Image (tube, helix red, strand yellow):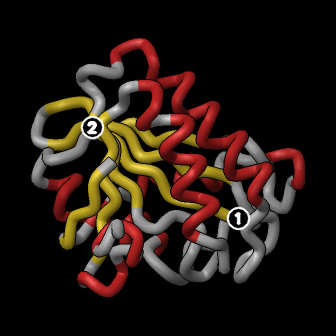
Amino acid sequence: MKYKIKSLLDAFEEGEINVMGQQCNCFHKMYAGIAPLIANKWPEVRDVDNATVFGDISKLGHFSVAQIINNGLPSAIYNLYGQFNPGPDTRYESLDMALTGMATMLAYDKDAIKIGFPKLGCGIGGGDWKIIEGFIKTIFVNQGFDVTIYVLNALEIPEWVRDPA
């Protein structure tokens, strides 16, 4: 797993990654954080979220996925249902389950998959990055997936990555 100072959306649009994931709530609210940027750029992301049942708690631990043709190549954006309510409500067990489902879905061709995430669930969702980073390492990195965490400035890179002493 590596960290890169760059917009996740630019990395996806430029083909640097071909899969991205974002944490979502169960109420079709993509109005804050990175969600509206993704949904406005790729409306299919909002469409697949809106196709799920509004406010259904059983979505926790699952995902919806938008298939995108990006620069003529198939790509995907995952809505990971790791919070029930909009706002600070990251539910670690649910996010872990959604990430596991995502990895299972992508395992068919992991050598061709390049995944990008923001600091998933840690902005509006209020999650602890050390916990979520551990999920990503266990579920993706330890299974051989190529994963990049995109941040907008060096201060968002965890101290244990910047200064691993």
Q: Nearer the viewer, residue 165 or 114?
A: 165
- The x, y position of residue 87, in whole percent, is 71, 82
Q: State which quadrant residue 40 falls in.
A: bottom left
Residue 60 visible (yes or no): yes
Q: Nearer the viewer, residue 19 or 29?
A: 19
Q: Residues within 10 Å of mark 2 (few under 14, many from 20)?
A: some
- The x, y position of residue 59, in whole percent, is 79, 47
Identified at 42% across, 37% down, the residue is 141
Amino acid type, callout 2: Lys
In this view, 90 is above or below 21: below
Secondary structure type for disc 1:
loop
Q: Nearer the viewer, residue 39 or 154?
A: 154
Label placed on residue 114: 2
Q: State which quadrant residue 157 falls in.
A: bottom left
Amino acid type, callout 1: Asn
Secondary structure type for disc 2:
strand
Label placed on residue 25: 1
- The x, y position of residue 76, in whole percent, is 37, 39
Identified at 66% across, 73% down, the residue is 127
Q: Quadrant of the C terminus?
A: bottom left
Q: State which quadrant residue 109 falls in.
A: top left
Q: Which of marks 2 and 1 is in front?
A: 2
Identified at 30% across, 65% down, the residue is 150
Is residue 54 rendered to the left or right of residue 79? right
Identified at 52% across, 64% down, the residue is 120
